[in-house]
Image (cartoon, helix red, strand yellow):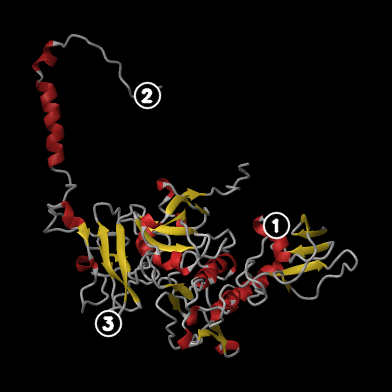
Amino acid sequence: MIKVTIDGVEIMVEPGTTILNAARQAGGDIVPPAMCYYSKLKGSGGKCRTCLVKVSAGSEKDPRPMPKLVASCSTPVQDGMVVQNITSPEVLEARKGVVEFLLINHPLDCPVCDQAGECHLQDLGFQHGSAKTRYEEERRQFDKIDIGDKIQLHMTRCILCYRCVYTADQITNQRVHGVLKRGDASEISTYIENVIENDFSGNVIDVCPVGALTDKTFRFKSRVWFVKPMNAHRDCNKCSGKVAIWMHGEEVYRVTGRKDKYGEVEEFICNDCRFEKKQKSDWVIEGPREVERWSVIGQNKYAVGTKVTAPQNIGYGNIID
Amino acid sequence: MQLTNRSKLVVNKELSWSEKLYLPAIFSGMMITIKHLFRKKATIQYPEQKREFSKVYRGKHILKRDEQGRENCTACGLCAVSCPAEAITMVSAERKKGEEHLYREEKYASSYEINMLRCIFCGLCEEACPKDAIYLTEELMPANYDRSNFIYGKDKLVQPLGTSAHPKTYKPYKK
């Protein structure tokens, strides 16, 4: 076990842990945001640069600071490393710049986008971005590609995090889905003939941090804050069958994996569970899912059974437990 | 607990002869009534006369169209979630080919209803709207005999085609 200090919080972690995972073990505000890193996908990370942190002391043996900000999702910790995240103004400034870069080609069509309300880029822009855009040029445009009747691809919204590509690589058997072209022109695509038919292809919807890949069966049906997330399960011979169903009244609007507080699904679910089982009778409902207090998903639902987690610190030094 | 020092002690004393006549009391009461006859009236004759509205008056809602006559609303649901009275409901639909002249974005509200009995005219929907679609105009809410007529659908809310963005039908947020 080696010791690492992040924003003054000392933690002991296994050798080989990345800074991001070490921060997640400590928890709280010091966890850097991540748009491309996904702990369940091997090889993910290092693309979006939102998790940049400052290493002010490399290790016990060599306490020189690292010359540049490093991506915490792909930098392993060393013994005695001192990391600054939110305590460093340099990091916050850099992160603001990264958000601005991510938003350069991202259309501001949140009112139309189905991901709005659970979008990581929205959260990131809200927490770290600047209030106004300085970008005046035209945003990139793509020809519309139809990738099947279950999954909707909006290439303009893609931030090229490659999560869906890694999902296609690791969860599905054959890769029919990848990144074409380079740089500014690169796009997530699939060979039109090989429309995704794998049983687990629907998981690209869950891993997508923005609204580039969305559920076509839920398209424009409702908004995430009008539907209530419930834990539910069923016997499924393909996957664990443990899902979150999003209900409005007695209707099941959509089915997703259960996401943890970092927006990562606990278990990947199969397409049968995701797209076909839209009846309340298909599911054994366990109860309402916990919704973070700041999330818009908890809006107007607090009285009817949705669990809303209270903030730990509610201001004026009034700390609960 | 004493709140003011104007309270009078109630005594059950016998009325005097002049008080038993009640005439002085009647006259003093009539004087007050007559005085009010010559005062400036607090009311106006409403349909003929109209009061000047405050610049920030919030009346009946309108769903705006843009300069080309397309509906601005994309059914994003922000007005409904910001509504403290939960008066707004909507159903969204996808714009089909050939409907580009009707709706500005690829998604639109196929039904948009405001329950005017619930609405408190706070204007939060106007504030929340990212698409400049909903505004509270200076129009008064008309009375009606039937409760069901107070649920305003798109037929009553959408700005009629061919109308300009004039303050009569459209109130900019700040003047």
Question: Any mark on residue B5, and which?
Answer: 2
In this picture, residue A32 sits left or right of residue A196 = right
Residue annotated with mark 1: A25
Q: Quadrant of the C terminus of chain B?
A: bottom left
Crowd around label 2: few <14 · some 14–19 · many ≥20 (10 Å): few
Q: Quadrant of the N terminus of chain B?
A: top left
Chain on which label 3 sits? B
Residue annotated with mark 3: B99
Which image quadrant for residue B151?
bottom left
Q: How many marks?
A: 3
Given residues B138 and A39, the one toward you in this image is A39
> In the image, what residue occupies the spot 80% across and 60% down?
A4
Chain on which label 2 sits? B
Vertical placement of A74 versus A25: above or below? below
Residue A286 picture location, percent across and down: 47, 49
Residue A127 picture location, percent across and down: 58, 64
